[in-house]
C-alpha cells in the first residue's frame, strides 16, 4: 500500500512539472520566432535619417538660396522648408500606407496603415538579409526623408518663377499622383530582396528631374521661351511680365548667383548627408554600407575635380560654382551604383558624369532654350543618364574596359564579383 501511494505521488509530481513546463516552452518558442532588433542597425538608420534630413534643411535650401538673386533668397528658403513640412505630414497621414502596403494591385498601396494604424514599438520592418529587422518607426522616418527631399529638389527648376500657393498645391498633388505610386512599384517588398539600385536614387532623381523639365517647359509666362513670346504683346509694366532683354538674361543666367558662399555650404552639407542617403539605404550596418560609403566619397571628389579642370581648360579659370556643381553631379551619378561598383570604377563614373553635366549645362541648355533657373534639370538629368542602368554590370570585365587593363593587378578595386550576404 505504501509503495503504491509513493508511486502515485511521484507520478503526480512529474505530471505537475510537465504541465508547468508547457507555458514556459511555448514562451521560449514564441521568443525564438519573434524578430529581434540589432541596436547597431537601429543606431545607424537613425543617424542616416538625420543625415538625409540635413540634406534638405538646411543643405538643399542653402544650395538653392545661394544660386538665386538676393531678393528671392528668402522665398527659396521658405519654399524648401515648407515643402519638407508638407510632405512629412502627408507621409504620416496616408503616404506611407499608399507606398508600403499591398492593396491587391502592383501600382499603389491601400490605406491599411493610414495614420500609422497597427504599428507599435515592436513592429518589424524587413531589411535585405534574412532574419534581420529594424523597427518600422525607424523605417518610416527614413523613407519619409526621401519623400521630403525628392519633392524639395523640384524647387531648383522654377525658383523665382512660381507663386508660393501654386507651389504648395503642386507638391501636394505631385507626391500623391506621382511619388507614392512609383515608390510602391519600386520600393515595396515583403521581405529580403535583391535590388540593384543601392539607394533606389535612380527612381528619386528620375521623378524630380521629370517634374523639373515639365515645369521648365510648360510653367506659364516667364518660364519658357515659346510661352514668353505669346505674352510679349501684353502689359510690360515692371513686376508684370518680362521683356525680351530681361527674359534673355534670366534664361542665360546673366543675373548671377546671390551668395556663392551659401551655395558652397549647401553643397558641403549635401555631400555629408549623402553618406546617409547611400550607405543608409542598405538598412543595415555591414560591409555593403561601407562599400557605398567609400564609393560616395571617391566618386564625388572625382566629379568635382573633373568639372573644375574642364572649366579651367575651357574658360581659363575655375570657379566655385562649377566645383559645387561637379560635386552635386557626382553625388547623383554614383548613387545607383554605390552599393555595387568598386571605388576606382565609381571614380571614373563620377568624372564621366561631371563632364556630361558640364556639356548639358553650358551647351544643351542654351540650344534647347528651356528656362531652368538653377541649371538643376540639366545637371541631374545628365548625371542620372550617365549612371549605369544596371549597376551590377560594373562588376564585369567587359564594362570596365580600359579601367580593367590599367588596374589588372588589383581588379577588386575596380569592380566587385557578385555579392553574397555579408557576415554580421
Image (cartoon, rainbow, N blue to C red):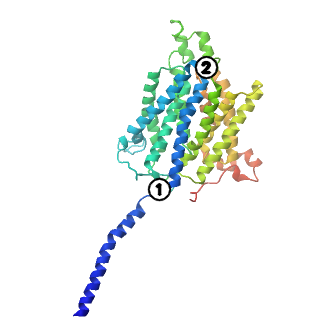
Instruction: Tell me the residue that label 2 is attached to.
Output: 369
Of the residues under marks 2 and 1, which one precedes in the sequence?
Answer: 1
Q: Residue at x 49, y 53 (%)?
A: 192
Measure the C-alpha gap from mark 2 to mark 1.
Answer: 53 Å
Left or right of 354 in this view: 117:
left
Q: In the rendered image, is residue 302 in sight?
A: yes
Find residue 137 and report its horizontal and vertical position in percent. Answer: 43, 46
Q: Badge 2 local density, few (<14 within 10 Å), some, or many (20+)?
A: some
Binning the other alpha carbons within 10 Å of mark 1 as few (below 14), some (14 to 19) or many (20 upward) gives some
Farthest residue to the left: give it: 1
| Nearest to the observer: residue 272 or residue 342 | 272
Q: Nearer the viewer, residue 4 or 392?
A: 4
Q: Nearer the viewer, residue 133 or 69?
A: 69
Residue of label 1: 37
> Which label number is shown at residue 55?
none
**Closer to viewer: mark 2 or mark 1:** 1
Q: Nearer the viewer, residue 313 or 317?
A: 317
State the quadrant of the N terminus.
bottom left
Q: Position of residue 154 (x, y in %)?
A: 53, 29
- Quadrant (top left/top right/bottom left/bottom right) for the C terminus: bottom right
Locate residue 26 relative to residue 287 in the image: left or right. left
Residue 243 sits in which quadrant?
top right
Amino acid at each position: 500500500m505504501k509503495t503504491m501511494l509513493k508511486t502515485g505521488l511521484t507520478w503526480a509530481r512529474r505530471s505537475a512539472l510537465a504541465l508547468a513546463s508547457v507555458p514556459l516552452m511555448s514562451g521560449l518558442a514564441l521568443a525564438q520566432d519573434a524578430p529581434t532588433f540589432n541596436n547597431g542597425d537601429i543606431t545607424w538608420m537613425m543617424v542616416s535619417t538625420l543625415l538625409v534630413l540635413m540634406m534638405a534643411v538646411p543643405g538643399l535650401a542653402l544650395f538653392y538660396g545661394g544660386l538665386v538673386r538676393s531678393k528671392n533668397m528668402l522665398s527659396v528658403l521658405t519654399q524648401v522648408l515648407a515643402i519638407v513640412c508638407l510632405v512629412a505630414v502627408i507621409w504620416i497621414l496616408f503616404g506611407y500606407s499608399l507606398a508600403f502596403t499591398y492593396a491587391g494591385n502592383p501600382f499603389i498601396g491601400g490605406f491599411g496603415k493610414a495614420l500609422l494604424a497597427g504599428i507599435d514599438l515592436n513592429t518589424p520592418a524587413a531589411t535585405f538579409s534574412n532574419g534581420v529587422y529594424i523597427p518600422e518607426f525607424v523605417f518610416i522616418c527614413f523613407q519619409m526623408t526621401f519623400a521630403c527631399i525628392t519633392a524639395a529638389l523640384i524647387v531648383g527648376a522654377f525658383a523665382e518663377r512660381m507663386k508660393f500657393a501654386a507651389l504648395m498645391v503642386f507638391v501636394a498633388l505631385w507626391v500623391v499622383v506621382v511619388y507614392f505610386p512609383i515608390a510602391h512599384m519600386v520600393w515595396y517588398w515583403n521581405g529580403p530582396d535583391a535590388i540593384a539600385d543601392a539607394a533606389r536614387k535612380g527612381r528619386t532623381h528620375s521623378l524630380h528631374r521629370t517634374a523639373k523639365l515639365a515645369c521648365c517647359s510648360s510653367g506659364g509666362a516667364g518660364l519658357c521661351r515659346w510661352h514668353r513670346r505669346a505674352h510679349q504683346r501684353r502689359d510690360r509694366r515692371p513686376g508684370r511680365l518680362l521683356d525680351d532683354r530681361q527674359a534673355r538674361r534670366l534664361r542665360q543666367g546673366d543675373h548671377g548667383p546671390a551668395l556663392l558662399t551659401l551655395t558652397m555650404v549647401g553643397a558641403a552639407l549635401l555631400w555629408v548627408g549623402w553618406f546617409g542617403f547611400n550607405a543608409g539605404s542598405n538598412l543595415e550596418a555591414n560591409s555593403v554600407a561601407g562599400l557605398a560609403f567609400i564609393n560616395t566619397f571617391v566618386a564625388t571628389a572625382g566629379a568635382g575635380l573633373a568639372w573644375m579642370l574642364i572649366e579651367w581648360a575651357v574658360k581659363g579659370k575655375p570657379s566655385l560654382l562649377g566645383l559645387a556643381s561637379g560635386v552635386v553631379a557626382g553625388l547623383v551619378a554614383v548613387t545607383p551604383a554605390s552599393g555595387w561598383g568598386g571605388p576606382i570604377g565609381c571614380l571614373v563614373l563620377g568624372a564621366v558624369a561631371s563632364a556630361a553635366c558640364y556639356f548639358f549645362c553650358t551647351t544643351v541648355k542654351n540650344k534647347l532654350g528651356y528656362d531652368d533657373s538653377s541649371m538643376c534639370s540639366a545637371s541631374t538629368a545628365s548625371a542620372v543618364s550617365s549612371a549605369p542602368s544596371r549597376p551590377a554590370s560594373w562588376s564585369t570585365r567587359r564594362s570596365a574596359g580600359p579601367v580593367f587593363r590599367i588596374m589588372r593587378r588589383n581588379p577588386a578595386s575596380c569592380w566587385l564579383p557578385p555579392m553574397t550576404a555579408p557576415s554580421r
